[in-house]
Image (cartoon, rainbow, N blue to C red):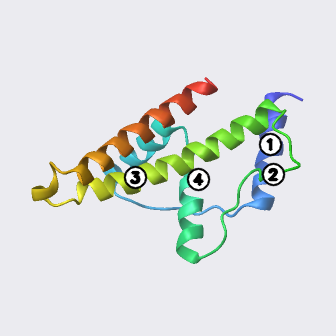
Amino acid sequence: MDNKARNKSKQDWNTAHYTQIKVSVDPVIASNFKAACIDSGISMAMVLSDFMCAFSGAPKLKDVSLSKNDSLSSRRLRRIRTKHLIHDLVLVKAAEQSYRDNIPPNLQNSQRFDNADLAVTSLDDAIDLLLDAFD
């Protein structure tokens, strides 16, 4: 199957299984969002879908969900699971970063601030390592 036929097949499948939504946002926000997604290795659609699920109360839809009996013998499955793990770590890091950034100035030399800062740094390192795992 050539690339043109493969792309057409993928487009047909996406049309049958997904609804396209157009979002208009400030160009700076859009640019920053796109850059953050590229930096973290997560698709913009995945971030928006997860947000929509969280906002609406719907369960998150994952490409692959593994039970105890499932195998990670396929490189594709390992890559997908790693992408999901990275996505979750990015969300945790953002929450921890927000927590750290909202610590009052009089507590920014405290153990509480240092612990939050260490968590952000450690999560960032973990994300970088996972991104490098499948380069």
The quadrant the N terminus occupies is: top right
User: x, y percentage for residue 43?
Assistant: 57, 45
The residue indicated by pointer 2 is 12
Question: Disc 4 or 1, which lies upstream in sequence?
Answer: 1
Q: CA distance from mark 1 to mark 2?
A: 6 Å
Q: Within the image, what quadrant is residue 74 found in? A: top right
User: x, y percentage for residue 19?
Assistant: 68, 64
Q: Nearer the viewer, mark 3 or mark 1?
A: 3
The residue indicated by pointer 3 is 94
Specify the amino acid type for callout 2.
Asp
Q: Is residue 131 left or right of residue 15?
A: left
Q: CA distance from mark 2 to mark 3?
A: 35 Å
The answer to which of 108 and 21 lies nearer the viewer is 108
Q: Residues within 10 Å of mark 3 (few under 14, many from 20)?
A: some
The residue indicated by pointer 4 is 45
Question: Disc 3 or 4, which lies upstream in sequence?
Answer: 4
Specify the amino acid type for callout 3.
Ala
